Amino acid sequence: MTNYDVFNGDTDGIFAWHQLRLAHPRDAIIVTGVKRDVNLVARVNAVEGDLVTIMDISHAKNRKDVQRILDSGAIVEYFDHHDPKELIDHANITYHINTEPNISTGLIVNSHIDGENRLWSIATAFGDNHIDLAMDMAKLENLSDEQIQILKHIGLVVNYNSYGQTVDDLFYSPEEIAEAAKKCGTDIFLFTEQGDIFSTLLDNYNADMGSAMCQEPYSISSNGVIYKLPNEVWTHRIMGSFSNHLVSTNKDLACAIAVLNSDGTYRISVRSSINNPHGAGDLCSKFDGGGREKAGGINNLPNSELASFKEQFERSFS
């Protein structure tokens, strides 16, 4: 029997996986990738008796491969917070899915394991921009202000590291981040001592965010803003973090960051407003993207559809 652990390469995916394996240790083949690699389940070639655990990966985008794995006789356990669309009715799959706007996969896993090692789940909430929720949870853990800030920065910079067109664009591969988390065991604060990972990510996060803040908006409407950025490695890295920053600093604002791809299409990151956290995933699904209520993305929007996207964005968040 072979075990497979499939998870997104962002804070939520990696730390959800780490929590689960702290509570339920299991040797497994790791399958992960950059945040926008939405077809990770296609890499799994399971057979009868294998166990496949999937975390923070869109069921809607991977349904055919999940069905293929189930047809092979393997067992699937699925943890996620994205809109799953149509679930599969099969005896060999167990779903742990919650699509509420202020939920992360890490929080879903933490509930499943009865609250063990909760600080890792709080970091996933910070990474997914559930800042108020994460702060409230952190305060319940009797952490100092300094510890809360460290926890917040761990969540933010690991998430920042997950954005890129390929793994080569990242400072550290998701596998390296996962291995660093594993070395920390239950103590998330040891993550700051795993070589130069934390300091490197924090320094570059701050530099890239500074560059993003100097850009001029492409479009401003009553309840939203769109930025259009050039095809640079740093713009692909910062797009998700920049989106989160914009909506966190103005809680009535929705935003979209459109970064030019090398093929002339646009990679887009969308956030609904903090005060009305709905509609981001639905908007992106109209353009062959996806996501959840609070956040969504499109990998390859043709330039010819950018005006239509702008119109739909303004309509969605009017």
Image (cartoon, rainbow, N blue to C red):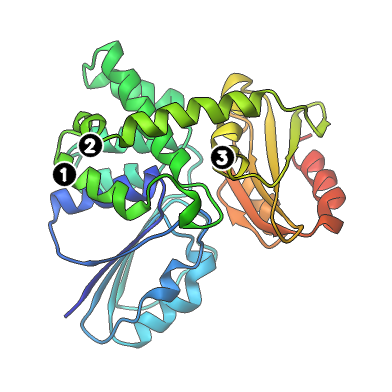
For marks 2 and 1, give the CA distance: 8 Å
Left/right of residue 294 with respect to residue 29 in the rendered view: right
Left or right: 247 as drawn, with respect to 37:
right
Q: Nearer the viewer, residue 52 or 230?
A: 230
Q: Residue 31, how many percent across, how many down? A: 34, 65
Amino acid type, callout 3: Gly
Q: How far apart are marks 2 and 3 (CA)?
A: 24 Å
Q: Which of 171 and 110 is in front in this view?
A: 171
The image position of residue 39, as x and y in percent, is 49, 68
| Residue labelled with disc 2 | 194
- Secondary structure of the residue carrying tag 1 is helix
Q: Does residue 233 lie above or below 36 as drawn?
A: above
Disc assigned to residue 183: 1
* Count of numbered tags: 3
Q: Which of the two marks, 3 or 1, is nearer to us in this view? A: 1
Give residue 240's mark: 3
Callouts 2 and 1 close, C-beta under 8 Å? yes
- In the foreground, 219 or 205: 205
Q: Residue furthest top?
A: 145
Task: First in sequence, mark 3 or 1: give its number.
Answer: 1
Q: In which quarter of the image is residue 318?
A: top right
Q: Eyeballing the image, is 175 above or below 256?
A: below
Judged from the image, the secondary structure of the residue bearing numbered disc 3 is helix
| Residue type at the position of mark 1 | Lys
Position of residue 81 measured from the top left corner of the image (x, y, whole percent): 44, 51
Residue 168 image point, x, y percent: 47, 55
